[in-house]
Image (cartoon, grey):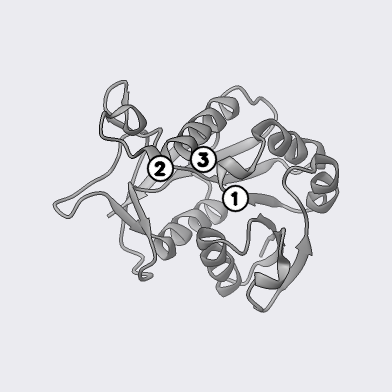
Amino acid sequence: MSQIALVGASGAAGSRILKELTDRGHRVTAIARNPERIADLPGVTKIKADVLDGQGLKTVLRGHDVVVSAVTFTSTEPRTLIDAVRKSGVRRYLIVGGAGSLEVAPGQRVLDLPDFPEAYRAEASQGAAFLDLLKQETELDWTFLSPSAEFVPGERTGQFRLGHDALLSNEDGSRISFEDFAVALVDEIERPAHSRQRFTVGY
């Protein structure tokens, strides 16, 4: 059992990660700007914090075994968030990534496709920039988990594939549920296999 700090615990991905963590017996400090939106689950301590307040966030994160970041990239300042984790003294850092920086061919990212939706471009670009910053990070033991192109509510099946930098897809397209994404992320916490790497999950 670990003590996990989960930033963005009230969001679509964060709430599923929170449930998966508590179902497996981990103790979680659930952090959000609006903690009243965080589910009441066993072993959870709710804390109000702002990801743009690096000093305050550093204090909240201190003393945990692992930090998980499940906030949207457009709502954060990457350096502020990464610095807060580093200065907190926590070394293990997992990030809910995006699919935009995954490759559909060598050197060609999803984000660079001509039909990439403009509505998602800012978030995808920020996510790619966040990953680039992490690749320069020398102190943190980080992992960036990218979902498939369709990241949607669904079922927890526990049946999925893992990849590295290439977008995963099958005859039904490129898809992963929030619930199965949470399984893959908590598996990585419990059995680290992608230290200082990005990996991806899909059906």
Local crowd size for mark 2, using a 10 Å CA cut-off: few (<14), some (14–19), many (≥20): few
Which residue: 71% across, 64% down?
34
Q: Is residue 104 above or below residue 70?
A: above
Q: Which mark is residue 154?
A: none
70 sits to left or right of 155: right
Q: Secondary structure at mark 2?
A: helix
Q: Nearer the viewer, mark 3 or mark 2?
A: 2
Q: Which mark is residue 144?
A: 3
In 3D space, how far apart are the residues under numbered discs 3 and 2 (Cα atoms)?
23 Å
Check the image and name the residue furthest to the left. 171
Between residue 28 and residue 117, name the one nearer to us.
117
Between discs 1 and 3, the one toward the N terminus: 1
- Residue that label 2 marks: 119
Residue 56 in percent (x, y) is at: 85, 47
Q: Quadrant of the C terminus?
A: bottom left
Image marks 1 and 3: residues in contact by CB distance under 8 Å: no
Q: Secondary structure at mark 1?
A: loop
Amino acid identity at mark 3: Phe
